[in-house]
Image (cartoon, rainbow, N blue to C red):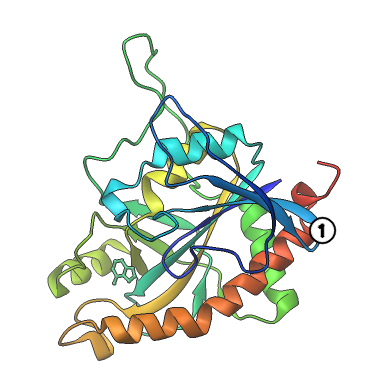
């Protein structure tokens, strides 16, 4: 069964035929909200709104460990993370959809591992490829089927937030090799890896990053809202396709 973590602009999945919601208790505290169970095109899926169903939890206060642990407990065999991003690259414009292949992590002070505590052995995990290749390919294939153009190769920079970046910080991220910037991709991706759950992301570009193009003199939140409103429909179509056609999403699994 696939799990979808929805970000800004995706606090519920309109195409999810909801069967029930479950409050999951975890050793790490409260997840962002109850887990929503349902079906998309007859295939089971679970959904969690990363920022809470009322969009009240900022990126640095999301309990990523509780969220990932809860989804694992609910039987998630794959996780598709949906998040909005700013574009650092001139050729990625608001409304574009990106399936990133790499991450640079600039976050700090977040609980970023399950492998800690007095009785826990020191554990390192391989994170060379932070996203699951097979699930990424399924997202790309699904986008192709529903006719949504996606950029299949991009480096995601995870910043701390909740403030947006300065123009100089964006210049630095570009020098580092980042293409898009968001605030929630880490530690979500690494926690999924620690739990051995395939994880991939769909990023919707909602603005040019600070200092770039029409964000040269500032970022317009009205414009972000409008892109979220108009372009999330494509992201929903990809999700519907990937859950419906995904072997992990099949009714028998
Ligand atoms: N920066 C960081 N996170 C974001 C942005 C941005 O410009 N846009 C959407 N999420």
Q: Which residue lies furthest to the right in this view?
A: 252
Q: Which one is in front, 3 or 150?
A: 3
Q: Which residue in the rendered view is the most extreme toward the front?
A: 20
Instruction: Give percent across and percent down for residue 86.
Output: 34, 73
- Of all residues, the one furthest to the top in this rendering is 119
- Position of residue 249 measured from the top left corner of the image (x, y, whole percent): 76, 51
Residue 118 visible to the viewer: yes
Query: Which residue bears the numbered disc 1?
Result: 42
Q: Residue at 37% of width from left, 69% of height from top?
A: 180
Q: Tell which of 39 and 228 is nearer to you.
A: 39
Residue 93 in view here: no
SS under mark 1: loop
Identify the residue at image location x=82%, y=58%.
42
Label 1: few (<14), some (14–19) or many (≥20) C-alpha neighbours in 10 Å: some
In this picture, residue 48 sits left or right of residue 172: right
Ligand 1 within 8 Å of disc 1? The answer is no
Q: In the picture provided, is 130 more to the left or to the right than 250?
A: left
Identify the residue at horizontal 33%, vertical 66% (top origin).
Answer: 181
- Above-or-below relation of 149 to 130: below
The number of discs equals: 1
Decide if residue 225 is on the left or right side of residue 140.
left
* Residue 71 drawn at (x, y percent): 56, 40
Is residue 145 or residue 178 the one in the foreground? 145
Q: Position of residue 37 (x, y in %)?
A: 66, 49
């Amino acid at each position: 069964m696939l799990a979808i973590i929805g970000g800004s602009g995706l606090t519920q999945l309109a195409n999810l035929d909801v069967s029930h919601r479950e409050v999951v208790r975890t050793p790490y505290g409260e997840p962002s909200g109850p887990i929503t169970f349902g079906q998309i095109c007859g295939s089971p899926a679970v959904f969690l709104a990363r920022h809470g169903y009322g969009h009240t939890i900022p990126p640095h206060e999301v309990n990523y460990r509780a969220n990932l642990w809860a989804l694992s407990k609910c039987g998630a065999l794959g996780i598709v993370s949906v998040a909005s991003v700013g574009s650092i690259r001139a050729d990625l414009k608001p409304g574009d959809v990106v399936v990133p292949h790499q991450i640079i992590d600039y976050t700090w002070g977040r609980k970023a591992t399950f492998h800690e505590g007095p009785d826990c052995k020191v554990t390192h995990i391989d994170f060379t490829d932070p996203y699951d290749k097979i699930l990424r390919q399924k997202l790309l294939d699904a986008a192709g089927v529903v006719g949504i153009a996606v950029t299949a190769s991009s480096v995601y920079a995870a910043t701390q937030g909740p403030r947006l970046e300065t123009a100089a910080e964006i210049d630095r991220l570009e020098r580092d090799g980042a293409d898009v910037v968001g605030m929630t991709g880490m530690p979500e991706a690494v926690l999924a890896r620690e739990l051995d759950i395939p994880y991939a992301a769909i990023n919707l570009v909602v603005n040019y990053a600070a200092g770039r193009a029409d964000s040269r003199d500032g970022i317009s939140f009205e414009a972000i809202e409008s892109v979220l409103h108009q372009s999330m429909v494509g992201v929903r179509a990809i999700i519907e396709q990937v859950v419906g056609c995904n072997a992990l999403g099949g009714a028998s699994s």
